[in-house]
Amino acid sequence: MADASQVRRLHVAGAAPYDVVVGHDVLGELPALLGEGVCRVAVAHAAELPDLAQRVLDALPADVEVLRLPLPDGEAAKTAAVAVDAWERLGAAGFTRSDAVVTVGGGATTDMGGFVAATWLRGVRVVHVPTTLLAMVDAAVGGKTGMNTDAGKNLVGSFHEPTGVLCDLDLLATLPRPELVAGLAEVVKCGFVADPEILRLVEAGPEAALDPAGSVLRELVERAVAVKAEVVAGDLRETGGTGGHPGREVLNYGHTMGHALERHSDYRLRHGEAVALGMVYVAELARRAGLLDDETAARHRSVLELVGLPVTATDAPTYDEALALMRVDKKSRGTTLRFVVLEGLATPRVLAGPDDALLRAAYDHLRGSG
């Protein structure tokens, strides 16, 4: 188990407060996060990660009864059929409200495992053990759970806060580089909307930002988690912020277009890659709307390119197809599209119902034709 001095505990305040534990070799913290009185634990894990799941299982108390819930890989896990199968297995095993779910995997596993925990007996405790950078800084923190439908991504879901999140940075050493790169998109997002020091760290050492064993990536994870923790503590259910701040909606920066591109690709485009493209899009939209200066808009491309994220949508739908996909985004209100944009670094706002000419021009820019 890690030296206590090397473990960072980031507290997420709110009605059901919890800690996010960040460090190396911290799986031994799992029993404390689960709490007392747990007789059974369902470990929901990506089926392709049996070895990582076993490492987590080994950290559980010996007297705890374990049920494995292997899930399909990626977005294929987030379907109604998968949820029903998990519910049936929990029922057959006799899971009660005093039992718990532990998720082991990336963002899709966290989303679906969290949704199963949120809906079984109207809510049982859940601890997330994210194994990807994306899940550590985004999906595992904040209590959002969800699954997909044919109409779009994450359209069915629930808010269900975990009892703890365990970010063992050693798990990132198993991650293929493209997945690590994709995860940095959500980190960079936090830099633009709230903590510009993140951008400075990435620009100063893009390779260091991708080194799971180094201090830079650890600081980036801690800073991104801290941004999300502060936002969700003030606006858990995305009802809005104060003083013109978008509240939790700010965490969707780049996601309206990102989700559209992700859905169009049938999820072959990684979430982080889609979000990177979405950030380039909203930066250009804000620039053309007279809200964002040229330098900050251009900085989106330069920072994302430094770490190998895409900045041009080369295999994108037509504008009309993209617009139709964006209209089913959760942030839309009726027929009005809403975008989180910037008026400057760490100065976000919502732009509602922008002119179609602006939307189209920004999309042409994203596709490299405008």
Image: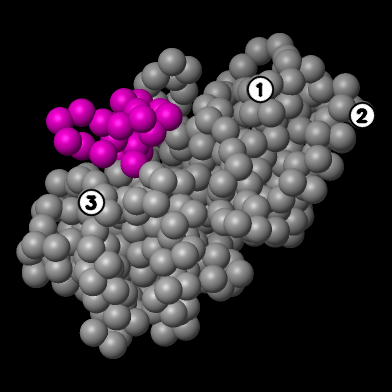
Q: Is residue 159 left or right of residue 319?
A: right
Q: Is residue 27 left or right of residue 39?
A: left
Name the residue beneath numbered marker 2: 92
Q: Which residue is farthest bottom?
A: 369
Residue at 35%, 45% in the rendered image: 251
Q: Give the crowd class for mark 1: few <14, some 14-19, many >=20 residues within 10 Å.
A: some
Q: How many marks?
A: 3
Name the residue beneath numbered marker 1: 123
The foreground one among 37 and 80 is: 80
Disc sitting over residue 73 in the figure: none
Residue at 56%, 73% in the rendered image: 265
Tag 2: amino acid: Ala
CA gap between label 2 and label 1 equals 17 Å
The foreground one among 185 and 335 is: 335
Mark 1 or mark 3: which is in front?
A: 3
Work out whether mark 3 precedes mark 2 in sequence or the reverse, and give the earlier one.
Answer: 2
Work out whether mark 1 precedes mark 3 in sequence or the reverse, and give the earlier one.
Answer: 1
Tag 3: amino acid: Leu
Position in image of residue 172 (x %, y %): 52, 56
Q: Is residue 177 left or right of residue 292?
A: right
Q: Is residue 64 left or right of residue 352?
A: right
Q: Secondary structure at mark 2?
A: helix
CA gap between label 3 and label 2 equals 48 Å
Tag 1: amino acid: Gly
The foreground one among 157 and 116 is: 157
Position in image of residue 54 (x %, y %): 74, 45
Q: Residue 129, can we see it?
A: no
The foreground one among 273 and 105 is: 273
Tags 2 and 1 touching, CB below 8 Å: no
Q: Is residue 77 above or below residue 265?
A: above
